Amino acid sequence: MVTPGTTHVSSSPEQTEALGAALASDLRAGDVVLLYGEMGTGKTTFVRGALRALGNTGPVTSPTYTIARHYDEGPVPVAHLDLHRLGDLAEEDPAFLADHVGPHGIAFVEWPQIADDDGQVMPRVVARVHLEHVTPEQRRVRISP
Ligand SMILES: Nc1ncnc2c1ncn2[C@@H]1O[C@H](COP(=O)(O)OP(=O)(O)OP(=O)(O)O)[C@@H](O)[C@H]1O
Ligand SMILES: [Mg+2]
């Protein structure tokens, strides 16, 4: 079970995708998942597995230069955000996140600490995924509430 309070070790990108898929099976519209970890730890890889499990068959690439990508192939719409390049969110329209995160869909947010919104804009965070390098091929994946 990939649920809050569990820690996993992944030895390949495929295993990290499988962890994302397992987490996705518990998600419903309105849920938000936050992903923490250094560059290259596998946040996007984890989300790719989740998107597959949620019925999206197309390519899943990092939204770094677009901030957000939307996947509408499955029964529940999914947004994938990467806030790394957003800089100071205060300079953005405050409604920015609300365009992507809301009751109608599931949202995955990489680098959520950039938003630092005290839960005002991302109200239903159901899981936080913390990824760490162990070896070049291994990652520790800890799930917290
Ligand atoms: N066990 C593993 N799990 C996930 N990725 C792995 C693993 N082993 C090696 N990799 C490689 O690490 C890279 C992870 O890239 P990914 O884009 O998912 O990271 P990221 O955390 O989203 O980075 P960024 O912060 O730049 O968005 C990929 O190139 C992947 O092939
Ligand atoms: Mg990424």
Image: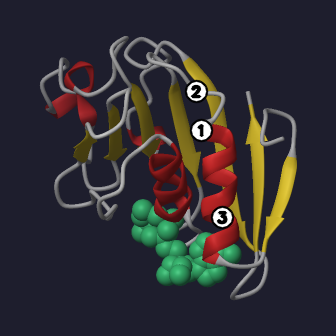
Identify the secondary structure beneath mark 2: loop
Res 126 → quadrant: top right
Crowd rating for badge 2 (residues with CA inside 10 Å; few <14, some 14–19, many 20+) = some
- Disc 3 under 8 Å from ligand 1? The reply is yes
Q: CA distance from mark 1 to mark 3?
A: 12 Å
Q: Assign the C terminus to one quadrant of the image.
A: top right
Residue 141: tell me if it is visible: yes
> Which residue was labeled with disc 1?
24
Q: Which mark is residue 16?
A: 3
Q: Assign the N terminus to one quadrant of the image.
A: top right
Please count the marks in the image: 3
Q: Are marks 3 and 2 in contact (CB under 8 Å)?
A: no
Name the kind of residue labelled 1 in the image. Ala
Q: Which mark is residue 93?
A: none
Q: Earlier in the sequence, mark 3 or mark 2?
A: 3
Q: Nearer the viewer, residue 118 or 15?
A: 15
Name the kind of residue labelled 3 in the image. Thr
Q: Position of residue 35 (x, y in %)?
A: 55, 46
Q: Nearer the viewer, residue 134 or 102?
A: 102
Q: Earlier in the sequence, mark 1 or mark 3?
A: 3
Residue 39: tell me if it is visible: no
Query: Eyeballing the image, is 62 above or below 80?
Result: below
Q: Position of residue 50 (x, y in %)?
A: 53, 48
> Which residue was labeled with disc 2?
27
